[in-house]
Image: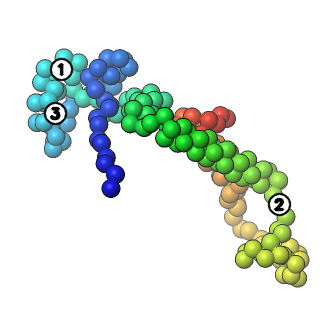
Amino acid sequence: MPTFIFERIAITPEQIVDFGLQEALRPTKPKDPRYRWFLDKYRDIAVLQGGLQSCELDAIRPTDLRDMVRKVIERHLSRKELDTVNARGEQEKIRIGGILDRFLDELHDPEPISVCHNGGPANGEWIGQWLEKPEPVVEFEAFDYDAAETRTLERMLRNDQLAAFYGLSV
């Protein structure tokens, strides 16, 4: 059975100063069940005003937080294990990049139907009959799924964490 080590790596009073997060400080919530513990633990910490101020983890930029996590993980892995994990990560980036490329290509230039839903060849008469069906009359404005999927994908790629993790840019 593997051994798990839990280590608090963020957010520390030193990081509040190092990353210039003083503007992100807010009053510690008295109704939080950890309030007394927090006051006791940080009683002598000036930047937290003796525990009366606190800072949320999301105040740290995602890239900085990811770097902190990566460094701690790398301390616990041998060079061989780290190389294996990095190689797998590169393979995943390539695989996901290919999936994204195919997805975007399909959005802009759809492939014709060439296989049945069960994976068999699409040589039945039903394809021609289906393609000949007239477009249904729609009384309301149809939702553009392709545009919605493209916007969603673009929004995902603009997300700093996702784009940086997969080495992508928009």
Quadrant including the C terminus: top right
Please report the residue visible at 52 percent of the width from the left and 42 percent of the height from the top.
Answer: 85
Q: Which mark is residue 45?
A: 1
Horizontal placement of 100 versus 123: left or right? Answer: left
Give the labeled residue for mark 3.
Answer: 38
At label 2, counting other C-alpha atoms closer than 10 Å, the crowd grade (few under 14, some 14-19, many 20 or more) is: few
Asked whether, in this view, residue 99 is left or right of residue 131, the answer is left
Marks 2 and 1, how far apart in space? Answer: 62 Å
- Please tell me whether mark 1 sits on a helix, a strand or a loop: loop
Name the residue beneath numbered marker 2.
111
Closer-to-camera residue (168/56) = 168
Secondary structure under the numbered disc 3 in the rendered image: helix
Question: CB atoms at circles 3 and 1 under 8 Å apart?
Answer: no
Q: State which tag comes first along the sequence, 2 or 1.
A: 1
Residue type, numbered disc 3: Phe
Residue 41 x, y percent position in the rendering: 14, 29
Mark 1 closeness class: few <14, some 14–19, many ≥20 residues within 10 Å: some
Q: CA distance from mark 3 to mark 2?
A: 59 Å
Classify 97 as above or below 168.
below
CA distance separating discs 3 and 1: 11 Å
Going from N to C along the chain, the mark reached first, 3 or 2, is: 3
